[in-house]
Amino acid sequence: MQSVSCKMNVLPTVAKQNSNASKVVASAPLTCNSKPVAQKPVFSAAKGTALATVRTARDVRMYGEYGASSTSFYTTVEKQDSYDDLDTVLNNKCSDALTRSVILEMLDAIGEITDALRSALVTVEGSSNTFGDQQLSVDVIADQILWDHCKRSEVVAFGASEEEPEIVPCNPNGEFTVCWDPLDGSSIVDNNWAVGTMIGIWGSKSGTGADGLIGATGRDQVTSLVALYGPRTTVLVALDDGVYEFSYGCTPEGCQLADGTFAPWICSRMQIKISEDCKIFAPANMRAAQEVEGYRKLLDHYMSNKFTLRYTGGLVPDVYQQFTKGQGVFSNPTSETSPAKLRLAFEAAPFGLLVEKAGGKTSEGVEGKSVLDVPILKVDQRTALCIGSSNEVDRFNDM
């Protein structure tokens, strides 16, 4: 098979997925204006249900890495000769077999959501979730995919979705309670901006022991995952010794399996660290600055000290950047007229586990304690949040 150079002047090569979407097979080079293979419709936009069990993927062209410009805070990740696949990393870095199993099931769901986002139109469903948020077609599809995986799982005892925050029994013999925000970023997905999925996983006997969630804290999570759907799909996963990033559907040189195919997931970052200082800020709920003098002064501090503003209005991309840049702070305080909106179990706790495991810090925005130490008393519990580089979270607590 022809090897793929990472120089940009080589002829791109096409890689086709096989029918079970588990491996990617390299084929002969094609020119850049060749047409992709047609996709078979799989999802019903009306119900978000699967119409077929096999997806015919588009051809995936294998290019070299893109070079970095002189833009500040650009990636510092260098090309490797090879990358570990998902199974290799999980076997070495996740000691519990059942935890490995639930991680794999959630990653399978994230892969399906990736495919759905590439083919589904963003339309209004004509319904709202229990928080009053307008539901979009892609929200419903992503939520249904996660429910399908949890309900047929042998290890998931209970599930709960941000779209309808009730704890639902899945498998009476399961070991885990899984909570998720299926598609964070509904207000920006129609712009074709990056959106994401957040998943927190607790032992089913956590907290009061009734459902694994009520009475538990974010620190009781056995793992959490956050997926970012952008030009690529990448997922952060909390493992035994740190935070790892996995990339979906990539075909880097040196990663071919023995039969010439590619594993669906490769490990693109290992043991990610977030520095204690930063120069990147993502300020949410800026309306609160009109009422909270400390927040207004904090924003003035960022601007007068020439911090770089990186904010999209989506929690996943706005916090995820801390793991790719190795620094950053996201702040979402509350005020009398701007109450807390972030969900503790579905958003703050899953991200909090990842950030603190990477060396960052979190605050629940009231007493200054970690968001991971806040007891979950209601499924739909809300919280203020500051999360990221520890020195800037301390500055937020002092405001």
Image: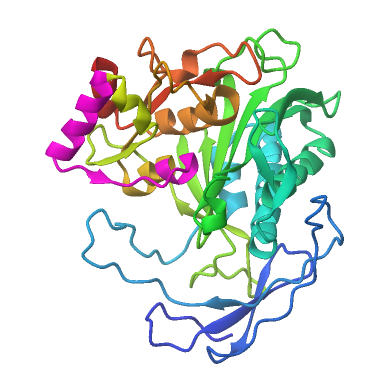
Look at the image and name its color scheme: rainbow
Q: Position of residue 273 (x, y in %)?
A: 35, 39
Which residue is pictured at 63% across the width and 21% down the height?
Answer: 380
Residue nearer the viewer, 298 or 64: 298
Q: Main secondary structure of the magenta part?
A: helix
With respect to residue 388, does 85 lie above or below? below
Quarter of the view holding residue 337: top left
Which residue is pictured at 43% across the width and 76% down the height?
Answer: 64
Which residue is pictured at 63% across the width and 62% down the height?
Answer: 263
Q: Residue furthest left?
A: 304
Residue nearer the viewer, 65 or 192: 192
Q: Position of residue 366 (x, y in %)?
A: 39, 12
- The segment highlighted magenta reads 293-318
Q: Position of residue 102 (x, y in %)?
A: 70, 37
Quarter of the view holding residue 346: top right
With respect to residue 58, does 92 lie above or below? above
Q: Is residue 63 visible?
A: yes
Does 314 appear in magenta?
yes
With respect to residue 157, does 266 lie above or below? below
With respect to residue 202, does 86 lie above or below? below
